[in-house]
Image (cartoon, helix red, strand yellow):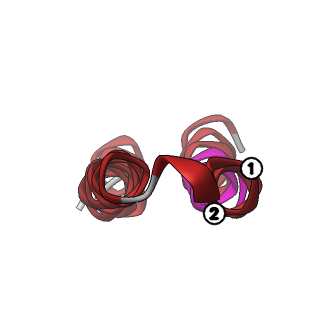
Amino acid sequence: MDVTAAKMIGAGLAVVALLGVGLGLGNLFSSLINAIARNPAAKNDIFPIGMIGFALTESIALLAFIVAMIILFK
């Protein structure tokens, strides 16, 4: 197998994590909106936790992207 082809396959497999990140973010914000709609008084307690969850989930996406770029260009 050619080295370039192996790099492309490896980068593609590294980016598969973005599927899980997309599903996770959709689920997170769906639940956040649902929770705030059910109890608007608790918005100040719920919203910061949702943003922390967003940041942690998005960090997985950035890590997967960085790994894919390292595989492609090293």
Q: Residues within 10 Å of mark 2 (few under 14, many from 20)?
A: some
- Compared to residue 49, the image places residue 22 above or below, namely above
Q: Tell whether 57 sits left or right of 55.
A: left
Question: Sequence-wise, which precedes: disc 2 or disc 1?
Answer: 1
The reply to whether the magenta stretch includes residue 49 is no
Residue at point 68% right, 45% down? 66
> Residue 24 in the image: x percent, y percent?
34, 62
Which secondary structure, mark 1? helix
Q: Tell whether 62 sits left or right of 40.
A: right
Q: Nearer the viewer, residue 33 or 25?
A: 33
Q: Main secondary structure of the magenta part?
A: helix
Disc 1 designates what residue? 44
Q: Tell whether 64 sits left or right of 37.
A: right
Decide: marks 2, 1 in contact (CB < 8 A)?
no
> Residue 21 in the image: x percent, y percent?
39, 57
> Residue 25 in the image: x percent, y percent?
38, 51
Which secondary structure, mark 2? helix
Q: Nearer the viewer, residue 67 or 24?
A: 24
Quarter the C terminus occupies: top right
Q: Nearer the viewer, residue 42 or 18?
A: 42
What are the residue bounds of the magenta stretch?
Answer: 53-62
Q: Nearer the viewer, mark 2 or mark 1?
A: 1
Disc 2 designates what residue? 53
Q: Is residue 28 visible?
A: yes
Residue at point 73% right, 62% down? 45
The dot on residue 64 is: none
Q: Residues within 10 Å of mark 1 (few under 14, many from 20)?
A: few
Residue at point 42% right, 61% down? 14
Q: Nearer the viewer, residue 73 or 15?
A: 15
Q: CA distance from mark 2 to mark 1?
A: 15 Å
Amino acid on which disc 1 is placed:
Asn
